[in-house]
Image: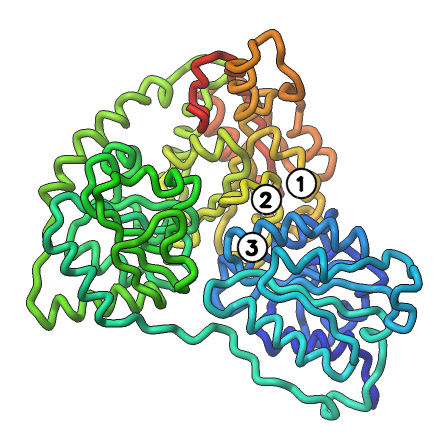
Amino acid sequence: MSVHGGKLAARALKKAGVECVFTLSGGHVMAIYDGCLDEGIPVIDVRHEQAAVHAADAWSRLNPGSIGCAILTAGPGVTDGVTGVANAWRANSPILVIGGQGPFDKLRMGSLQEMDHVGVMRPITKWADACYDTARIPDYIEMGVRHAISGNPGPAFLEIPMDVLMGRVESMESVRWPKFRRTAPQLAPLEADCREALEILASAKRPVLMAGTSVKWSNASAGLNAFLERTQIPTYVNGMGRGTVPPGSNYLLNRSRKDAMKQCDVFICAGVLLDFRLGFGNSIPADAKIIQLDIENELIGQNRSADVGIVGNIGASFETILKIMDDEKQTLDFSGWLNELKPREAELEAAVEADLNSNESPVDPLRMCREVRDFLADFDQDCILIGDGGDIVAQASKVLPVPAENGWMDPGPLGTLGVGMPFALAAQASQPDKRVLIIYGDGSFGLNGFEYDTAIRFNLPIVGIVGNDAAWGQMIRPQATIYGSNRLVATKLNYTRYDKIVEAMGGHGEYVERPEDIRPALERAFASGKPALVNVKLRQDVDTGMKGSTYA
């Protein structure tokens, strides 16, 4: 019996390990939805294509071996998804985005919503192409997945014109079904590079290690922590490295990074790029040696050369280093240096104690974060945390411990606001036994807050808490500093009742003005069993001190 191309696409997605697709209904791509019904692939339809791609991104982050997939209709459907693709590009998330197109037999004739999608997507994807033969749809989907998951992962984009997608083949068996690999082969490091790194560490007095995003994509947490347990090197985390070192680990520090880096003589970048977060390499002392571990050679030495570059799966790299240490009975113990930093860590923690315990109303943002921290410490279910904002994410990351690997997601290096609810949709749909909490800024809530409608329609009991200071906080302070507090433009919002918006959709809303009311509101929100939002009125800081700002 003949079948249309949408059924081929859905069967190929199933073979590729796709467990759910995110989309916004569109005529160019609806044939794939029909195929998904046959294959038992859930289709979650959102209210904006940007959210569909963000959700696919989060799905890949949380579910190794199951690639996230977004399906976008042609023209504005694809362009609406561009921001999500760009965010996945900078975060190295392996996703497959399928875009519609006008009929191939009308190509370049001006069909409805026709445009050069591949040209738009090519600069922000690892692979972008179009399929013009119905029988080859599975081939092209396999190519896209293979490029997305290989090496340093990232997004892939496949365009399928609507007449190709709706075209028919004789049967499922009449097409070639390629073999799908759900994970990329793991590249082993050169032993010589690992030995050279150990030689540098053997003469070090004050090494510092930072674990980042590629540790997550390498599934390297076991090897990393075995190495750290052995050496007791002071360790910090950033990006998707958060959670790969368990909270409470003796060697994990948080607030003292700047002080440690100023004094370090060896800096180990484990899956960390020397980008703006590390002053493009200038945050590391000029005379310090750099050991850099990453998945691909192209990632080694960006902005500042590494003294040793170890290329390969980062987990395999740490395992090789440990094997050499075992074979040669080598001991490295930096616990003395670690203990020198701990008083500074405690001092910096004490410096914010007043803010963490502030009783003022409107609420101090650090007090809000502390209330969330204390609530989660007593919460009896595993929780995935999502940060969506500028100031509030920077503050929350200093207060909230990441409970476990894959326990925290945030906008990432592109700084894309609006990821909160899209990320949460994927998190709750793929991890139904866990609870999901979004920490929002009020500015970021406005971008994709309407996706509460999606959570309500799909019965996903996601809880959000908005730090509402009626401003674009990360912008208003530097604007006041540079131009004067009487010249504020485009940085003020209203103390909007976002909780009422969620209530109107059918969710649970709470409004809080006093810090002692935050925890009871969170308890009621989680107990409601509905998508819920706690709207906390925060103090609006407009001063030249830029308190709490990442510009400070």
The image quarter containing residue 398 is top left
- Dot 3 falls on a residue whose secondary structure is helix
Counting the numbered discs, the total is: 3
The reply to whether discs 3 and 2 touch (Cβ–Cβ < 8 Å) is no
**Residue 112 or residue 406, whichever sits in front:** 112
The residue tagged 1 is 448
Above or below, comparing residue 371 to residue 106 in the picture: above
Which residue was labeled with disc 3?
A: 89
Which quadrant: the N terminus? bottom right
Residue at image position (69%, 28%) is 500
The answer to whether residue 251 shows anywhere in this view is no
Residue 326 lies, in percent from the top left, at 12, 69
Q: What residue type is labelled 2?
A: Val
The spot of residue 132 in percent (x, y) is: 79, 76
Q: Is residue 25 visible?
A: yes
Position of 223 compared to 271: left or right? left
Element on which disc 1 rests: helix
| Camera-nearest residue between 152 and 230 | 152
Task: Report the disc number at residue 419.
Answer: 2
Is 173 on the left-hand or right-hand side of 253?
Answer: right
- Please, what secondary structure does the residue beneath circle 2 have? loop
Q: Which of marks 3 and 2 is in front?
A: 3
Amino acid type of the residue tagged 1 in the rendering? Asn
